[in-house]
Image (tube, helix red, strand yellow):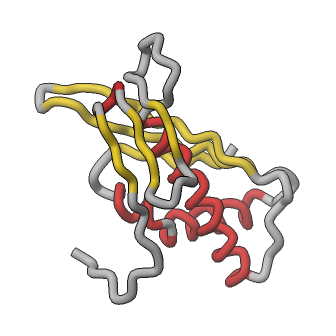
Amino acid sequence: MTQIEKVLYTAKVHTTGGRDGASRSDDGRLEVKLSSPGTKGDGTNPEQLFATGWSACFIGAMQVAAGKMKVTLPPDLAIDAEVDLGTNAGGYLLQARLNISLPGMDRETARALVDEGHKLCPYSKATRGNINVQINLI
């Protein structure tokens, strides 16, 4: 297991009620109601939050990669993240797809950026080898 040498940031969130509860960050910037997927609740769910965090982080990793490669990312770069919650005989599992759009960028450069972003992104590192992941350049 790789160890952190220097902590850059620690997110602190207080959650009550599980999937049908609420979460609030210690700085007050995040306050969300939670609802189980597929229910009529008016909150978000952990899978949506995970998809949001991963896609935002992945864009940041591609920005770092673009700097290293000395290329400019298109201003309308976007990621549509899909996180599935499912089951098998062992219980509940996640799987994910990141569908990455780099409009106007040649395919070879775009693929290199996506691949490097996947290597650099902390969410990608955390999930690598642990869940089914597809990284799609669309």
Q: What is the number of callouts on the image?
A: 0
Q: Residue at x 30, y 26 (%)?
A: 86
Camera-side residue of 71 and 35: 35
Please identify the quarter of the rendering in which residue 75 is found. bottom right
Q: Residue at x 27, y 52 (%)?
A: 130
Q: Residue at x 29, y 31 (%)?
A: 17
Image position, residue 60 (x, y; %): 63, 66
> Quick one: which residue is furthest to the top in this view?
40
Image position, residue 105 (x, y; %): 82, 59
Image position, residue 41 (x, y; %): 46, 16
> Quick one: which residue is furthest to the bottom in this view?
5
Above or below, 97 relative to 44: below
Q: Residue at x 27, y 35 (%)?
A: 93
Please identify the quarter of the rendering in which residue 3 is found. bottom left
Image side of residue 55 versus residue 63, left or right: left
Image side of residue 28 versus residue 38, left or right: right
> Quick one: which residue is furthest to the left in this view?
90
Above or below, 68 relative to 46: below
- Quadrant that contains the C terminus: top right
Image side of residue 12 versus residue 43, left or right: left
- Quadrant that contains the N terminus: bottom left
Image position, residue 32 (x, y; %): 50, 37
